[in-house]
Amino acid sequence: KLVINAVPFLVWLYFNKYLQEKEHNMKMRHAKNEDLDKIMKIIDETVKEMNENGNFQWDESYPNREVFINDIKEGTLYAAVNDRDEVIGISVANFDSFEEYDNLEWKSQKSDYVIHRLAVDNVYRNEGVAAFLMENIEKEIIKKGKCYMRTDTNSKNIKAQRFFEKVGYKFVGEIKVPRLKDTFFCYEKRLCD
């Protein structure tokens, strides 16, 4: 009887050890051109899920391969990779933002980095990949002498809103971008004292 009751505990223990090992084997690096097929597969999966949830921030035309080629060329596209160096998540950190950002009262400056195009492989969802990417990008930004990070997400992207709040980003305000249908929620995070 004791052995039967211990089985669920042992399964839980093994699974937690497995997740910890997976997390410890993740690395972050700059994305390369050889990663583009995998990146586009992640984007296609993400677009499908977003659209199914009524969020049309991304579609079949954006973000596209050319956008990521440019991100790679500029050195702004970061990739979380597994122990086989396969891309499992991506995000961009650059200085691009909507003009409408200027209408909000930020603590950060226009010269601070902005997170864009955060996406995780469906197989690795809910395993800490996005948080791992954000944490490591933030460390890189601090090394570059910046203390704030900005981001935005579609007002219908509840998952992203919850995620940004979970990893310490504070809501700054809402903007309406004329060429886009929905409004966007903007966030920032102070990274250093």
Image (cartoon, rainbow, N blue to C red):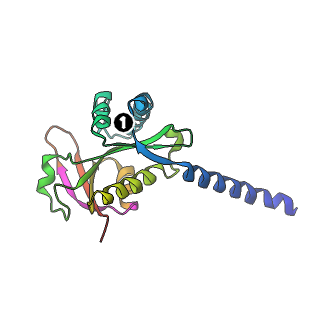
Q: Is residue 137 left or right of residue 149?
A: right
Residue 14 picture location, percent across and down:
70, 54
Q: Is residue 145 above or below residue 175?
A: below
The answer to whether any part of residue 120 appears in the image is no
Residue 153 picture location, percent across and down:
29, 48
Q: Depth check: give the residue in front, 98 or 137.
A: 137
Residue 43 picture quarter? top left
Q: Depth check: give the residue in front, 8 or 111.
A: 111
The answer to whether any part of residue 39 appears in the image is yes
Residue type at mark 1: give it. Answer: Asn
Q: Is residue 141 above or below residue 80?
A: below
The residue under label 1 is 51
Q: Which residues fall within the magenta stretch? A: 166-175
Most common secondary structure along the magenta stretch? strand
Residue 171 covered by magenta stretch? yes
> What is the tally of numbered marks visible in this picture?
1
Q: Is residue 71 left or right of residue 6?
A: left
Q: Depth check: give the residue in front, 20 or 156.
A: 20
Q: Name the image quarter holding the N terminus.
A: bottom right
Q: Depth check: give the residue in front, 26 or 159.
A: 26
Residue 50 picture location, percent across and down:
37, 39
